[in-house]
Image (spheres, rainbow, N blue to C red):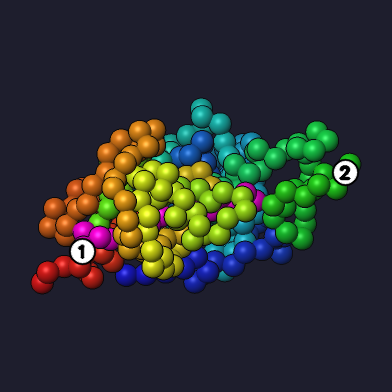
């Protein structure tokens, strides 16, 4: 079932049109952890972080959420207000509303972009945030850097009614999942799907169809989902990113990924379309 999109109650703005006394939603991060109420997992809604005795390392206006201003902020590790906790954004997914999760995902990406683009990558001068758009400009050489998005493809590949799943060797993905990888410069999305499949499991595929997309703020990806059919070849894993891969039927699927991911949506698409019932 498609999730609500980010713009239902959220409006991106680059410059606040309110005074600092307006109550605001605060997406406060320490590393990848979001500050929430310990009892109900709600984010702070207040006029200023001074009310929580917090001094932000950086503060960025995000736009309006439910008609109220919203901000992203970063604080250091020794600042945790009483009655609140910092919790990993992934772990918060089932505890907070979907729209808060989506804006939080945007917020952490902007925090990381702001932190990592304080200086110009061309001439080394300090950058400034532009007023007209979410971008950094170098006052010396004029180089502009927008918020970073890294497109990646993920594909549900089917052969004779069975789904290809692979066991990854890294990060949170040391379980069976779908074939996925980042798009390279100079290639189309469909070419990225074909290349990743060949590189990781040595298979040729056909009938590549776009499925949907999902922002994935871990750390700054845009996941683009596809479906495809097996064409030829035998499974041969690369041994680096992938340790094992095989075809699974609807009745013997491994542990499924969280509802947080488009991977789960693709697997559910497979189950709905290839179930024997």
From the image, state whether disc 1 or disc 2 is nearer to you: 1
Q: Main secondary structure of the magenta part?
A: strand
- The quadrant of the rendering that contains the C terminus is bottom left
**Residue 227, position in %: x, y?**
36, 64
Q: Is residue 48 above or below residue 244?
A: below
- Determine whether 232 is above or below 108 in the image: below
Cα separation between marks 1 and 2: 56 Å
For image coordinates 23% across by 47% down, the residue present is 246
Confirm whether residue 66 shows in the render.
no
Measured as percent of width and height from the top left, residue 98 is found at 40, 61
Task: Name the residue at 51% across, 27% down.
Answer: 78
Q: Say if 152 sits above or below 207 in the image.
A: above
Residue 150 among magenta residues = yes
According to the image, label 2 marks what residue? 141
Q: Is residue 54 left or right of residue 177?
A: right
The magenta span reads 147-162
Q: Position of residue 253 (x, y in %)?
A: 18, 52
Q: Quadrant of the N terminus?
A: bottom left
Q: What residue is pinned by disc 1?
A: 161
Secondary element at image label 2? loop
Residue 1, which numbered label?
none
């Amino acid at each position: 079932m498609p999730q609500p999109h980010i713009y239902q109650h959220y409006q991106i703005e680059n410059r606040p049109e309110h005074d600092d006394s307006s109550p605001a939603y605060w997406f406060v991060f320490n590393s990848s952890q979001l500050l929430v109420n310990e009892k109900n997992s709600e984010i702070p809604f207040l006029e200023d972080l001074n009310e929580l005795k917090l001094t932000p390392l950086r503060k960025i206006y995000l736009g309006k959420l439910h008609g109220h201003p919203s901000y992203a902020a970063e604080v250091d590790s020794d600042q945790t207000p009483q009655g609140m906790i910092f919790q990993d954004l992934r772990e918060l997914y089932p505890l907070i509303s979907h729209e808060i999760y989506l804006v939080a995902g945007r917020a952490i990406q902007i925090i990381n972009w702001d932190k990592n683009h304080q200086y110009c990558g061309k001439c080394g001068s300090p950058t400034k945030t532009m007023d007209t758009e979410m971008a950094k400009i170098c006052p010396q050489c004029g180089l502009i850097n927008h918020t970073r998005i890294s497109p990646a493809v993920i594909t549900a590949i089917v052969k004779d009614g069975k789904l290809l799943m692979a066991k990854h060797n890294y990060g949170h993905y040391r379980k069976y999942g779908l074939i996925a990888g980042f798009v390279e410069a100079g290639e189309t999305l469909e070419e990225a799907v074909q290349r990743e499949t060949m590189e990781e499991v040595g298979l040729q595929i056909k009938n590549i169809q776009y499925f949907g997309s999902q922002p994935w703020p871990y750390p700054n990806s845009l996941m683009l989902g596809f479906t495809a059919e097996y064409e030829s070849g035998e499974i041969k894993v690369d041994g680096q990113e992938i340790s094992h891969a095989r075809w699974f039927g609807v009745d013997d699927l491994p542990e499924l990924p969280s509802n947080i991911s488009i991977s789960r949506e693709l697997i559910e698409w497979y189950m709905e379309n290839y179930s024997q019932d």
